[in-house]
Amino acid sequence: MVKTTCLLIGLTASILVLSGCDKQPEPMGEKLITVSKTDFESHCQRCHSLEVPLRRNKSLEGWRETVTRMKEKGLEVTPEAAENIAKYLASVRGK
Ligand code: HEC
């Protein structure tokens, strides 16, 4: 019984440590732009051209709302990619 408890505590601890390591430092600057551009190009021209978003300027909040709205229209995107796309657009088409 004692053994099982120790094992459980050990297991929980290692899961905690592992999930802590999972948080990689956020890519910044050039790297974020490059990564996010790929996300943008692979997600945002299925229904219309990339020109549609690139013709506009919005704040980061505005772009987040736009990506959310596109999800309602059927865009399939992970939360990470959605955030990358919003950041990318805010950096190249911000206001
Ligand atoms: C499932 C189809 C679909 C996908 C994928 C899609 N869109 Fe759209 N988008 C639409 C439709 C339909 C419209 C026009 C109707 C409207 O504006 O509500 C539109 C319009 C827009 C507009 C103009 C209206 C506005 O809100 O300013 C922008 C900007 C836009 N999309 C950005 C994006 C971005 C950024 C992505 C990628 C994250 C994307 N779209 C992916 C369907 C899509």
Image (tube, rainbow, N blue to C red):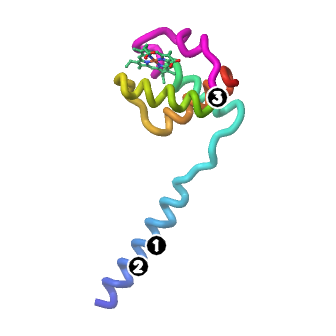
Q: Is residue 6 left or right of residue 18?
A: left
Q: Which residue is drawn at 64% across and 28% down?
A: 59
* Residue 72 x %, y %: 37, 27
Q: Alpha-carbon distance for marks 1 and 2?
A: 6 Å
Q: Which of marks 2 and 3 is nearer the N terminus?
A: 2
What label does residue 53 carry, if any?
none
Residue 84, by quadrant, is: top right
* Residue 4 x %, y %: 31, 83
| Dot 2 amino acid type | Ile
Q: Please give the range of residues in magenta.
A: 43-58
Disc 1 and disc 2 in contact, CB within 8 angstroms: yes
Q: Is mark 1 within 8 Å of ligand 1?
A: no
* Residue 82 x %, y %: 49, 33
For the residue carrying disc 2, how many other residues have a C-alpha within 10 Å: few (<14), some (14-19), or many (20+)?
Answer: few
Residue picked out by circle 2: 9
Of residues 29 and 94, the one drawn nearer to the viewer in this rendering: 94
Q: Is residue 47 above or below residue 95?
A: above
Q: How many marks?
A: 3
Residue picked out by circle 1: 13
Q: Alpha-carbon distance for marks 2 and 3?
A: 46 Å
Assign the magenta stretch its main secondary structure: loop
Q: The N terminus lies in which quarter of the figure?
A: bottom left
Q: Residue at x 41, y 72 (%)?
A: 12
Q: Alpha-carbon distance for marks 3 and 1?
A: 41 Å
Q: Is residue 67 left or right of residue 30?
A: left
Please state which of the two labelled residues, at mark 2 or mark 3, is closer to the viewer. 3
What label does residue 59 carry, if any?
3
